[in-house]
Amino acid sequence: MVKQLKIHITGMGGQGIGATSRIISRAAQLAGNTVMTMETHGLAQRGGVVVSDLAIGFDPSESPICSDGESDVLIALEALESVRSLPRLKPDGIVIVNSTIYQPLTVRIANGQVQSPTMEQIVKELHRWTKNVVQVDAFNDSIELGLSQTMNVILLGALARNLSILPFSKEHIIESIRLNIPRKYHEVNLLAFEKGFNYEVV
């Protein structure tokens, strides 16, 4: 029996939300699952919020949108966006969150009068919703690899490491990475995927 899974992906423009969605979608398809996606762009090229919803194993006539309380998995490439998207997550869902925080414009122009939440505060808020939180230092890991654009693939590795309910295998994700990313970047992205396996629920 095919497992049904809804995934909500959120982050800022330029962080690879679309690529993340495509890799997951193709991995699910390689495993024989139906996949529906819906992507929403804010001012993506100006660092606006981008979200993508995936519905795996559902009837194609149904909406892929993750309404409140419907998402099994929340993948956040930007830490503050993980909190904003929490209502989409089921109470027992899992959060894969990049520990990178991009300060909002209101914080940047406030000359210290407005403070951005710390990562510790963000994780505490996530834990109020679910005990299944995986905090990933994807930025520093990607810098070690020499390519900051691998942050999203590091989070995919963390997802695969911690989520036994995925209706596709690690091998399906690896094959999907090869199919979705230019050949010259295969090696570094496969290393990034393996780096994600260092992270567990905290």
Image (cartoon, rainbow, N blue to C red):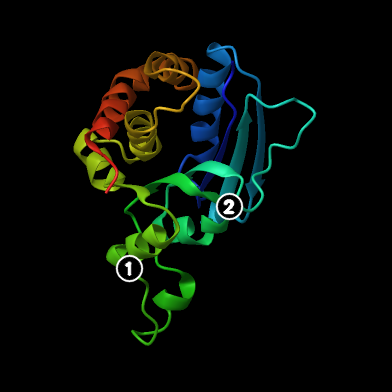
Q: Which residue is drawn at 37% across and 28% down?
A: 160
Residue 62 position in % (x across, y down): 76, 33
Q: In whole angstroms, how far apart are the C-alphas of marks 1 and 2? A: 20 Å
Query: In this orientation, which residue lies closer to the viewer: 88 or 100?
Result: 88
Residue 2 position in % (x across, y down): 59, 18
Would you place residue 154 above or below residue 70 in this image? Answer: above
For label 2, count other residues whose C-alpha is less than 10 Å away and answer few (under 14), some (14-19) or many (20+). Answer: many
Q: At numbered mark 2, what does the secondary structure look like: helix, strand or loop? A: helix
Q: At numbered mark 1, what does the secondary structure look like: helix, strand or loop? A: helix
Check if mark 1's residue and mark 2's residue have beta carbons within 8 Å: no
Which quarter of the picture shows residue 32? top right
Identity of the residue furthest to the right in this view? 61
Q: Which residue is drawn at 61% across and 56% down?
A: 43
Would you place residue 108 above or below residue 143 in this image? Answer: below
| Mark closer to the chain start, 1 or 2 | 2
* Marker disc for residue 88: 2
Q: Which residue is drawn at 36% across and 18% down?
A: 184
Query: In this orientation, which residue lies closer to the viewer: 133 or 98?
Result: 133
* Marker disc for residue 121: 1
- Disc 2 marks which amino acid? Arg
Which quarter of the picture shows residue 169? top left
In the image, 157: left or right of 77?
A: left
